[in-house]
Image (cartoon, rainbow, N blue to C red):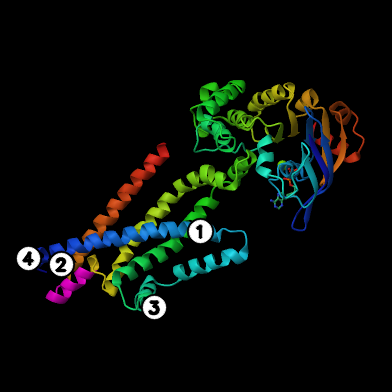
Amino acid sequence: MDFQWDILVEYAPFFLKGTLLTIGLSLAGILIGTVLGLFIGLGKMMKNKFLSFPFSVYITLFRGTPMLVQIMLIHFAVVPLFTGGTNGIAAAILTLSLNSAAYIAEIFRAGIQSIDKGQMEAARSLGMTHVQAMRYVILPQAFKRMIPPLGNEFIVLIKESSLASLVAAPELMYWGRAMQGQYFRVWEPYLTAALIYLVLTLSLSFLLSRLERRLSTE
Amino acid sequence: MIEVKNLKKSFGTNVVLKDINVKVKPQEVVVVIGPSGSGKSTFLRCINLLESITDGHVYIEGTDITDKKSDINKVRAEVGMVFQQFNLFPHKKVIENIMLAPMKVRNTSAAEARKKGLELLRKVGLEDKAEAYPDSLSGGQKQRVAIARALAMEPKIMLFDEPTSALDPEMVGEVLEVMKQLAKEGMTMVVVTHEMGFAKEVGDRVIFMDGGLIVEENTPIELFDHPKEDRTKAFLSKVL
Ligand SMILES: Nc1ncnc2c1ncn2[C@@H]1O[C@H](COP(=O)(O)OP(=O)(O)O)[C@@H](O)[C@H]1O
Ligand SMILES: [Mg+2]
């Protein structure tokens, strides 16, 4: 195996652009997915079974089918339905957000339900409303417990954003495939992409473990 | 002060309270005893609607709390509750545990709430623990903080659900001491406990519950020394 550094140098600007888009897609997926996930998680926790049922269905669908299938459906069927054309970046962000929302909803629900029932009762017995008890007593405790699984989900999201290359969103993996197509080389593009993904996921784990330590000593 | 009329409570098909009628006068200390599973906790929890009431009425200072129109948060703010498991907020310092409800429910300023909180901590002998986190306290200290937290809302009534049952024996005394002090200051109290010494010293009345019913009620001396019902005798012979 002779490693051709010159074609890597040639592709470096594309990899850089691709990495930025990968970060952008992941961030968008994390942010939108977290907000959506919070609402879907709360929705699933509603006592009324008829109201909570759609949220359960949503979670089951998105967790029970491959993301590859989801992104194909969204790219070739859902997005054209609304805009009349395809758009790889929009489809990627939509898929990552909707998919991670399902997982994050479950993380929120598990986090909230892991807090001892006595906490809510103590807060309510002091005259706090349900919302106040959630806001000041339950959520701050649940949030700490949610950081490790949320971190995992964010890391999964960075890796899964590589599926966007299949709908022509020019992110990291897209340029890797482009390089393979142009030079018929496989080691150079994919090892490089792997290394960049590793740097991204390791940086995120590092940030999360620092946040976790900071909160646990508070 | 508190009037419980024909209170019934079921969990599904399990009827836990059958027909409870109790009146508690201002400044009265009522002690509730009875075997495990007899419905003592459920009874207390119905008084501030931590459990929904299946049937009957509970009046707190004339307000029917079973009436959908009454503001239950307002009623709860007047009724303090102390739990067997303390239920302190572990993410907040001791003083913050005490300040939280007055600030959020009564809109007390932080400075005012802190001043009041420190006063209450002094009262329960824990002024030096204001900045500590609950995890660093002993069981007895936790329960004293929980009492201070409830008192910070300036409740007119205090409910205690086996406040010393989760404590190591050497810590029971310090908590009972605080409760006796409260009783002497004229607090209206309903206390589920098996501390007979406490019942005799500060209790005005003892209620014996069994199987979701009030079997017998009397002054502590009469009930403990001359129980009338067989079930009361059987229970007392086991715990005394
Ligand atoms: N949330 C609940 N759901 C179902 N059953 C309950 C619940 N809480 C209490 N019970 C039942 O009610 C009965 C009385 O319980 P409780 O009031 O805790 O008794 P005590 O405090 O006298 O030991 C028990 O049989 C218990 O199993
Ligand atoms: Mg009990």
Determine contact: label 4, label 1, CB under 8 Å: no
- Figure check: A167 above or below B50: below
Residue on which disc 3 sits: A81
Percent coordinates x, y for residue A118 in the rendering:
61, 43
Secondary structure, mark 1, is helix
Does residue A179 sit above or below B195 in this rendering?
A: below
Query: For residue A176: magenta?
Result: yes
Q: Are marks 1 and 2 in contact (CB under 8 Å)?
A: no
From the image, state whether disc 3 or disc 1 is nearer to you.
3
Which of A19 and B167 lies nearest the eye of the viewer? A19
What's the residue type where badge 3 is placed?
Leu
Q: Return the disc, 3 or 4, that comes first in the chain's sequence.
A: 4
Mark 4 is surrounded, within 10 Å at the Cα level, by few (under 14), some (14 to 19) or many (20 or more) other residues, namely: few
For marks 2 and 3, give the CA distance.
38 Å
Horizontal arrangement in the rendering, residue A90 relative to residue A196 (left or right): right
SS type, badge 4? helix
In the structure shown, which secondary structural element does the residue marked by tag 3 occupy? Answer: helix
- What residue is pinned by disc 4? A6
Work out whether mark 2 precedes mark 3 in sequence or the reverse, and give the earlier one. 3
Q: Residue at x 54, y 26 (%)?
A: B112
Q: CA distance from mark 4 to mark 1?
A: 50 Å
Q: Are marks 3 and 4 in contact (CB under 8 Å)?
A: no
Q: Are marks 2 and 4 on the same chain?
A: yes
Residue nearest the viewer, comparing B164 with B106: B106
Label at residue A188: 2
Tell me which numbered mark, 3 or 1, is placed earlier along the sequence: 1
Disc count in the image?
4
Q: Amino acid at mark 2?
A: Glu
